[in-house]
Image: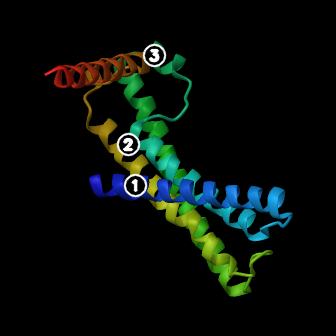
């Protein structure tokens, strides 16, 4: 799924660069030229929606969503696995619902001919960001749900164990880079 990684990260990079440039241009325009770029807020707000959706997908892939691990850390691996499958399964269903109702929203915007306030663009153009991002969210949550289903209960780790393993991997990678530099 490297292609999904590249697409998700590329979209996030484009959104962040565009948002930063638009906000900077608007601030410059307001304080130096004493003019406001009214369209910049509209575009930035909608890009933020897309960025949030794609960020959610990336966080799901990395299992980096905030959670209360006090319960999952206190139970047996078998129960922990069940709780994780249930939670990730619900997240998959929720993401799919966001996709489904996002399509309904876009369809409604298109049929009603809604336009954006500032630029008078068709609202459905920005509306597509919701189902588009929800597809990535659904794929990522479904992936980790399936991973949990395939993982034997005795191999299910607590959040603390995962954090320690990740830190050890990062440390090993840094040491390897330092050794390469000294050669």
Residue furthest right in the image: 34
Q: Position of residue 57 (x, y in %)?
A: 47, 49
> Are circles 1 and 3 on residues that touch, CB within 8 Å?
no
**Between discs 1 and 3, the one toward the N terminus:** 3
Which one is in front, 169 or 57?
A: 169
Residue furthest top in the image: 74
The residue labelled by disc 3 is: 73
The residue labelled by disc 2 is: 145
Q: Position of residue 61 (x, y in %)?
A: 39, 43
Q: Residues within 10 Å of mark 2 (few under 14, many from 20)?
A: many
Q: Position of residue 84 (x, y in %)?
A: 43, 32
Scheme of image coloration: rainbow
Give the vertical position of 121 relative to 52 (above or below): below
Q: Is residue 113 left or right of residue 107?
A: right
**Between discs 2 and 3, the one toward the N terminus:** 3
The residue labelled by disc 1 is: 139
Q: Is residue 1 visible?
A: no
Quadrant housing the C terminus: top left
Q: Is residue 37 visible?
A: yes
Q: Residues within 10 Å of mark 3 (few under 14, many from 20)?
A: some
Callout 1 secondary element: helix
């Amino acid at each position: 799924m490297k292609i999904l990684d590249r697409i998700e990260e590329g979209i996030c990079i484009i959104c962040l660069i565009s948002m930063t440039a638009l906000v900077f241009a608007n601030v410059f325009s307001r304080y130096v030229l004493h003019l406001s770029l009214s369209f910049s807020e509209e575009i930035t707000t909608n890009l933020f929606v897309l960025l949030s959706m794609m960020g959610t997908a990336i966080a799901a892939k990395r299992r980096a969503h905030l959670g209360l691990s006090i319960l999952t850390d206190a139970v047996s691996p078998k129960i922990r696995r069940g709780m994780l499958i249930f939670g990730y399964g619900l997240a998959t269903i929720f993401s799919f619902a966001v996709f489904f109702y996002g399509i309904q929203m876009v369809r409604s915007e298109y049929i009603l001919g809604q336009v954006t306030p500032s630029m008078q663009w068709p609202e459905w153009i920005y509306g597509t960001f919701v189902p588009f991002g929800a597809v990535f969210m659904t794929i990522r949550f479904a992936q980790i749900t399936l991973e949990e289903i395939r993982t034997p209960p005795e191999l299910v780790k607590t959040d603390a164990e995962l954090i320690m393993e990740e830190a050890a991997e990062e440390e090993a990678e840094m040491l390897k880079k330092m050794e390469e530099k000294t050669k």
